[in-house]
């Protein structure tokens, strides 16, 4: 067990950075983090996390990294030792981070070349949040596509220390690092890529106002609103200007008694994909958007110094 506490943020590589940044600031409800250097654009939510999204310029869209929290510097150092003992490729050794929010952390590659950051002592937001019509609080979960569901599940449970909460037959696995039903999930597909990114809001009322905001900006939902079976959360999915699929969500299930919890296997039937029966299962064109483009991993050629 590495001792991961929570999901912090996600970094995305975008070919149309300016348009993407305007969308998240003017439509989605995030606030741009001021006074940051370089080409990267950082966004905070209404919660205390320094930033929950970072956008990086690049020719092709893809995942830059996913960041998870740890308790302190000692936890990061212990995680490095465990990862090295298991033959995991560390591409940034433990040290003070050169990114907005600072902190102390490391980065490693998973078996499909996703860059994962583990960090502690990251700055928190002390500036008061200005309420809007919709106020995303934090990242709720991230879902990735994988070419090998069993392999990636084994890695994230037996090496990284996540626990399996539920399965959607043998198509998806939901993984937790705390009491939340899942912070990370994987979907079996033809290649590794980003499936979708979920932003948490406070209530179903706020989620519906978020839908109205995005519609008013000329973007139509691609699935939802509805209520999932696995996780029991309310959802609505959209596609941003770079083609990433993102979700407003609320009311995700919590695991109150770890000792008693046993992973369930959910049938992939319409009334469990959407308990309300309004959205139904995702349409083929929505699944295609969630499939995304094959992502070899930006750091696959990186050599650690």
Image: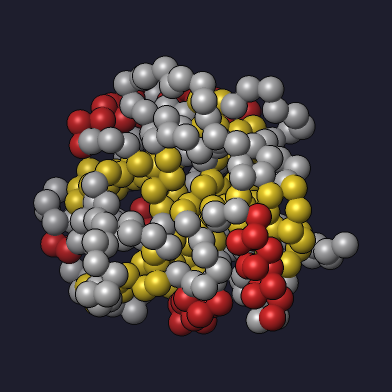
Up/down of 240 relative to 287, above or below: above
**Residue 23 seen from this side:** no
Q: Residue at x 35, y 41 (%)?
A: 200
Q: Position of residue 106 (x, y in %)?
A: 69, 58
Q: Where in the figure is residue 125, as x and y percent of width and height?
A: 53, 30
Residue farthest to the right, as pictured: 305
Tell me the quarter of the image containing the C terminus.
bottom right
Query: Residue 215's x, y, as percent?
Result: 32, 28
Q: Is residue 108 above or below residue 220?
A: below
Q: How is the image coloured?
A: secondary structure
In-image side of 280 versus 218 (left or right): left
Left or right position of 118 against 28: right
Q: Residue at x 30, y 44 (%)?
A: 249
Q: Residue visible at 47% across and 29% down?
A: 30
What is the x, y in percent for residue 65? 62, 53
The quarter holding residue 115 reads: bottom right
Residue 169, relative to residue 14: is it above or below? below
Instruction: Give whichever of 246, 198 is nearer the camera.
Output: 198
The reply to whether residue 89 is visible in this rendering is yes
Q: Give the quadrant of residue 228.
A: bottom left
Query: Relative to 54, is 263 on the left or the right?
Result: left
Whether residue 155 is situated above or below residue 33 in the rendered picture: below
Q: Residue at x 44, y 49 (%)?
A: 197
């Amino acid at each position: 067990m590495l001792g991961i506490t929570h999901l912090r943020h996600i970094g995305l590589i975008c070919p149309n950075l300016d348009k993407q940044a305007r969308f998240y600031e003017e439509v989605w409800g995030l606030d741009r983090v001021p006074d940051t250097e370089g080409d990267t654009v950082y966004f905070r939510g209404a919660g205390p996390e320094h930033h929950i999204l970072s956008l990086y310029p690049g020719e092709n869209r893809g995942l830059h990294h996913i960041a998870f929290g740890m308790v302190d510097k000692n936890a990061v150092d212990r995680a490095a030792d465990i990862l090295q003992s298991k033959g995991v490729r560390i591409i940034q050794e433990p040290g003070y981070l050169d990114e907005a929010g600072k902190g102390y952390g490391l980065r490693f590659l998973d078996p499909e070349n996703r860059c994962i950051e583990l960090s502690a002592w990251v700055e928190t937001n002390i500036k008061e949040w200005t309420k809007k019509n919709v106020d995303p609080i934090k990242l709720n979960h991230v879902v990735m596509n994988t070419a090998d569901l069993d392999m990636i599940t084994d890695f994230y449970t037996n090496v990284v220390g996540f626990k399996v909460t539920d399965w959607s037959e043998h198509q998806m696995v939901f993984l937790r690092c705390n009491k939340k039903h899942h912070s990370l999930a994987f979907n079996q597909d033809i290649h590794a890529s980003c499936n979708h990114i979920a932003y948490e809001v406070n209530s179903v009322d706020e989620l519906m106002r978020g839908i109205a905001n995005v519609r008013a900006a000329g973007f139509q939902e691609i699935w939802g609103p509805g209520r999932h079976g696995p996780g029991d959360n309310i959802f609505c999915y959209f596609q941003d200007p770079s083609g990433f699929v993102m979700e407003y969500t609320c009311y995700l299930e919590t695991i109150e008694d770890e000792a008693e919890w046993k992973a369930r296997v959910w049938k992939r039937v319409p009334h469990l994909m959407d308990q309300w029966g309004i959205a139904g299962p995702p349409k083929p064109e929505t699944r295609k958007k969630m499939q995304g483009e094959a992502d070899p991993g930006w750091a696959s050629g990186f050599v650690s110094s």
